[in-house]
Amino acid sequence: MRPPKRRRYAAVAAAFCVALLVAGCGGASSAADARGEVFLQPAAAQGPDPYTATTAISADAPSPPPPVPSSDPSPSRGQTLRTLSGATPGLYGGTQSVGSCDVEQQVTFLSTDQAKARAFGRAAGVSQADIPEFLRGLTPVVLRADTRVTNHGYRHGSATSYQSVLQAGTAVLVDGNGAPRVRCACGNPLKPPVAVKGAVVHTGQAWSGYQPDKVVVIKPTVQIINSLVIVNVINNTWIERKTGTDGEEDKRPDVLPPVTPDDIFVYPPVTEPPGPGDSTPPGDSTAPSDGTSSASPPEQPVSPPVEPVPDTPSDVVPPPVEPDVPSQEGVTPSEPDLLLPSEAPAEPVTVQG
């Protein structure tokens, strides 16, 4: 069991996360960003220029099918990326009482390489001395949908950045605002995505079932989340995981979300509670291998989408954050979807490696 989470640092991380949204997520863009490249990364692949060896812990669960919406968005909108709040129940998954990433091993890897630790701290927005505390304050889970992020690599002693899509099933460390901050397969820091210039060109290694218009964007919450409601990747049930823990305090949520785990990524959003016969998704063979976090059980998982934001070079993908208002149960309500412009590939995917 890792040391208890320090709430003081969580508050600092929250303020930093809000600053990222206002300032454009920070960090210098790489040449790949300027060319409109979005790098596809399968869940288990280490990828280019990793910071560390993998610290991901396999859940030995079947890979989830790609989210398939019940109907496509209006053709007038073009292909867009749906944005979900980091507090959405079922956005992340995991295994009961088992973390998806060995946090202490991640701390050890960075503690033994000072150059990488300095680059990691600059990319993550924390001081080198605070890296152990930062990592121990994160929560290990897995993505349940292909997710767009700003990824980072370590090359020639410096941090690089590039736009990336992480496959559903990827093990990540999530902060107190529900945002993925570290990819466990390579130790790379993560930040919210930014719009690329020009036409999008997908590079890297595509996976079976990948569809650019099914990719999601995760928007950090303004207020700190005390627990995540995730999906058990073994039996497709709900788990409440206290943030900053490895799962040792996992329990069944006192109040279950009003939808089934399989409804989270349905489009249009499912807003009505399931019927008596729909409380458990049929069959274990379709159970997702990843799960999602939430601020609290009663929160609505998905809100109606808004119009896409023009993709100009200076645009920051998420618009200014509106304050979240906690409910009576202390739950941060879901926020309106934010949409990246069309992410359809301009050219066929280039498979590298």
Image (cartoon, helix red, strand yellow):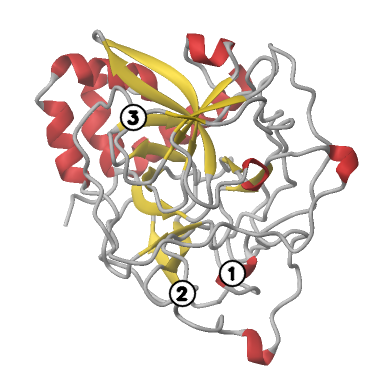
**Quadrant including the N terminus:** bottom left
Discs 3/2, front: 3
* The one of 124 and 193 positioned closer to us in this rendering: 193
Q: Residue 257: percent from the left, percent from the top?
A: 60, 72
Residue behind mark 1: 262
Q: Count neighbours of disc 2 (C-alpha within 10 A) and say few if under 14, some if 14 to 19, many if 20 or more.
A: many
Amino acid type, mark 3: Gly
Rendered view: 138 above or below 343: below
Which residue is outermost to the bottom? 276
Pointer 2 with pointer 1, Cβ within 8 A = yes
Mark 3 secondary-structure assignment: loop
Is 119 positioned to the left or the right of 107 in the image? right
Which residue in the structure is indicated by mark 2?
236
Q: CA distance from mark 2 to mark 1?
A: 9 Å
Where residue 6 appears, as percent x and y from the top left, is 30, 43
Residue 3 shows up from this direction: yes
Q: With 141 as the anchor, is 209 left or right in this view?
A: right
Circle 2 sits in a helix, a strand or a loop, which is it? loop
Res 353 label: 3
* Residue 29 visible (yes or no): no
